[in-house]
Amino acid sequence: MVDVTDKALEAVEVARSTGKIRKGSNEVTKALERGNAKLVVVAGDVSPPEVVMHLPLLAKEKNVPCIKVPKRDELGAAAGLSVATAAVVIVQEGDAKSLIKELSESKGD
């Protein structure tokens, strides 16, 4: 499990510098609905959980891999923020393309 989490955070970091990411559950929702999302990463410690509860379902519907990471602050740091974030979406992979491919294959859903 740790492996998937690390890879997801690494993919966010790589895409941040070489591609394009969007931060926050509203931005993630918009990217999914517009069909721009390549990978969704959601934090597991979001309170209330309703804020991000729809994201895995929407991602599955759109056939986009969705990875859950344990902490919002880790996700925020990977996204280059000084604050925690509930969700991040990669809209342009940049150099993270192979990481995203690995993640979607390892998810198996």
Image (spheres, grey):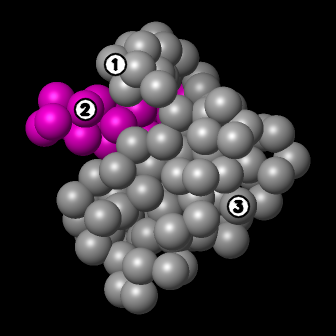
Q: Which residue is mark 2?
A: 4
Q: In this picture, which residue range is highlighted in magenta?
A: 1-19
Q: Amino acid at mark 3?
A: Thr
Mark 1 and mark 3 lie on one chain; the one further toward the N terminus is 3
Mark 3 and mark 2 lie on one chain; the one further toward the N terminus is 2
Where is residue 101 drawn, in percent x and y? 48, 15
Residue at left offset 13%, top offset 38%: 2
Mark number displayed over residue 29: 3
Mark 2–mark 1 distance (CA, rounded to whole Å):
8 Å
Is there CB contact under 8 Å for labels 1 and 3?
no
Where is residue 106 drawn, in percent x and y? 34, 18
Mark 1–mark 3 distance (CA, rounded to whole Å):
23 Å
Query: Relative to residue 5, is residue 25 depicted above or below?
Result: below
Where is residue 15 drawn, in percent x and y? 52, 34
Q: Amino acid at mark 2?
A: Val
Which quarter of the image is occupied by the N terminus?
top left
Mark 3–mark 2 distance (CA, rounded to whole Å):
22 Å
Residue most extreme to the right: 34
Assign a secondary structure to mark 1: helix
Where is residue 21 drawn, in percent x and y? 60, 47
Is there CB contact under 8 Å for labels 2 and 1?
yes
Residue at left offset 59%, top offset 23%: 94
Query: Relative to residue 11, is residue 97 depicted above or below?
Result: above
Q: Is residue 100 visible?
A: yes
Assign a secondary structure to mark 2: helix
Q: Which residue is mark 1?
A: 106
Mark 2 and mark 1 lie on one chain; the one further toward the N terminus is 2
